Amino acid sequence: MSAPTDRLVAEALAKSGLLWLTSAAGSAPCWHVVVDGVAYVVTGPGEQYSPVHVGRTSVVARAKESRARLVAFDAEASVVSPEDDDWEAATGALKAGRLNAPGGDIVARWREEATVLRLVPDLTTVVLRGQKLPPPAAESGSTSDTPTPAQQTPGDRPDDGRRPASGPTRSARAAAERANRAAQRADEQATNESGPPSPEAGSGDDGGAAKVSP
């Protein structure tokens, strides 16, 4: 299992007094024990009832006092046989957690009559108090989500204050307008200094029209 998710799951399982197990075989609540982050359940004659879950199994752990949901996850369920390496650890913990145990060698009876199940949590499915936890980090090289300049579109590139050339600038247009107005004022001044043309311009030396005799 992978810290810190495995630690949170193990703590929630240790604080839980009941697991609700659901699989294709059926559904039932069970008391359990936890050894190294793995949950174990015993079922059979004289013990609690539970379907024999094998394969994908939904697990919901509830608090001992309030029965509030602590953690939920999918687990890989399998049967623990006496030949398995974890048989002694699992049955030892189950024996210690068994309330009102009958006399005799209870572990020997479980060997003959009962079924011990192991439930290995799938850490990618953990929901802790209603919040889904992130899966364990994959061991791969980090990659950047920031596109390179070649990958960026024009709208994505940062604005460096420059604008594309699109005709004369505002200052150039203003200078041209000022020059045009100055030329107009110069023409008007020249016209005023010369004055309007004389009415007599182009008349004869006699100062007027020729008189006609009666």
Image: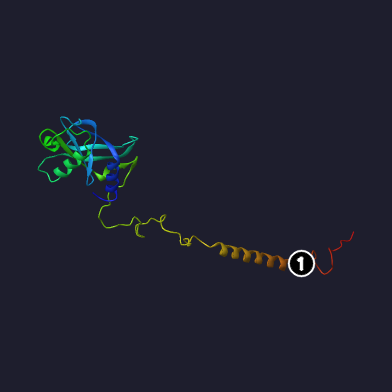
Tell me residue 10's x, y (percent): 27, 45
Q: Which residue shows up at 18% across the image and 36% down it? A: 42
Residue 110 is left or right of residue 134, and the answer is: left
Tell me residue 212's x, y (percent): 87, 61
Of residues 94 and 3, the one nearer the viewer is 94
Q: Which residue shows up at 27% across the image and 47% down it? A: 6
Of residues 51 and 88, the one nearer the viewer is 88
Q: Which residue shows up at 16% across the image and 40% down it? A: 91
- Looking at the image, can residue 76 be seen? no
Q: Which residue shows up at 56% across the image and 61% down it? A: 170
Which image quarter: residue 144?
A: bottom left
Residue 195 is left or right of residue 44, and the answer is: right
Secondary structure category for the residue under label 1 = loop
- Looking at the image, can residue 69 be seen? yes
Say what amino acid the circle numbered 1 marks: Gly
Quarter of the C terminus within the rendering: bottom right
In this view, 56 is above or below 141: above
Tell me residue 186's x, y (percent): 68, 68
Residue 196 is left or right of residue 127, and the answer is: right
Instruction: List the single residue furthest toward the front.
Output: 103
Which image quarter: residue 211?
A: bottom right
Tell me residue 62's x, y (percent): 30, 37
| Residue identified by numbered label 1 | 195
